[in-house]
Image (tube, helix red, strand yellow):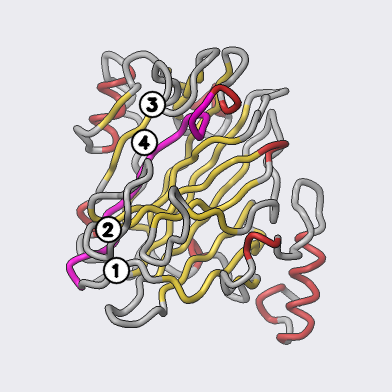
Amino acid sequence: MSYDTLPNGKRHCAMLMMALLPGLAAPAMAKSDEGNNLSIPSEAACSTRYPLVASPAPAPQAEDAKSAVRDGFGTQRDWGTEDNVALLSAGETGLNEPGLRIRYPAGTSSPGDTEKGGAGFYAAPDALAGAERACLQYRVRFEPGFNFVKGGKLPGLFGGEAPSGGEEADGENGFSMRYMWRKHGQGELYEYAVNQDEEYGKSVGRGLWSFPTGQWVTLEQEIILNDPGQANGMARVWVDGRPILEQRGITYRTSEAVTIDGLMFSTFFGGNGKDWRTPRDQHADFAGFRVYAPRS
């Protein structure tokens, strides 16, 4: 009997067992998540439920990494791609497709705090225009022995102006739904949405999974926007195909003009301040970007 055909009660037990497999934390909700309407997804991973609409990848014939990002991901909004991005061949990723190696030079953290470490860009596939639900899948591989320090940012979906860096998500300027790694590799969702209750982004589900080093991890994120005037938005996370987190009651928007635009590629150490900065040169690899959404 497959996971998807299990009765609800046994399915919940199965999810608890899967969450206890190596590399994943037990699904008990952290104190910081009280009131965040968290549970474990009962749905199959979103990549199995929506059709594939985009699979951006670095352009293989580009003359440099910056051009490879701009051409392959269809963006002109990027930073750090000249100094902190290197191209990986299909052989170097081992995934039969190319990838990106992102450098975090010693002493760097967020772009507003130090010299730029990491990189960022925005990719908005035409196929997502007007989307109110979407699914992002990609793979990340931290170098062996990666020092996670206090934390750092990882890519996720965005809409509108993608508020971040302490900006307020007011319901009309959009949202951002990135991931973070935290101390010892703990994972979490890092949210800028209307119901954000922090000066910066909202930490959700911290420690429900942990990132290993030296191996690929597949992250999968589903977003369902709320109806304006209702707090009925949703986010779900799967890690290596295992159901990890479902959050209900999210207010992404107060206007129908805000929709899901695409990938916010954003990765760096921090936080601000010296306690967040990487103590040595480090890197992480990214590949296998896929965007899924219902066809209009």
Which mark is first along the chain, 1 or 4?
Answer: 4
Badge 1 density bin: few <14, some 14–19, many ≥20, Cα 10 Å: many
Which quarter of the picture shows residue 1? bottom right
Which quarter of the picture shows residue 173? bottom left
The residues colored magenta run: 256-273
Question: Does residue 91 appear to the left or right of 229 in the view shown?
Answer: right
Which residue does the numbered mark 2 point to in the structure image?
Answer: 174
Which mark is first along the chain, 1 or 3?
Answer: 3
Residue occupying image coordinates x 65% and y 70%: 40
Which residue does the numbered mark 3 point to in the structure image?
Answer: 111
Q: CA distance from mark 1 to mark 2?
A: 7 Å
Q: Nearer the viewer, residue 262 or 60?
A: 262
Residue 139 % position (x, y): 54, 41
Residue occupying image coordinates x 68% and y 81%: 5
Query: Which amino acid lies under the numbered mark 1 shown in the image of this protein?
Result: Arg
Residue occupying image coordinates x 25% and y 22%: 67
Which residue does the numbered mark 1 point to in the structure image?
Answer: 253
Q: Secondary structure at mark 3?
A: loop
Residue 149 % position (x, y): 65, 28
Q: Nearer the viewer, residue 148 or 168?
A: 168
Taking 34 as reference, is 1 above or below it? below
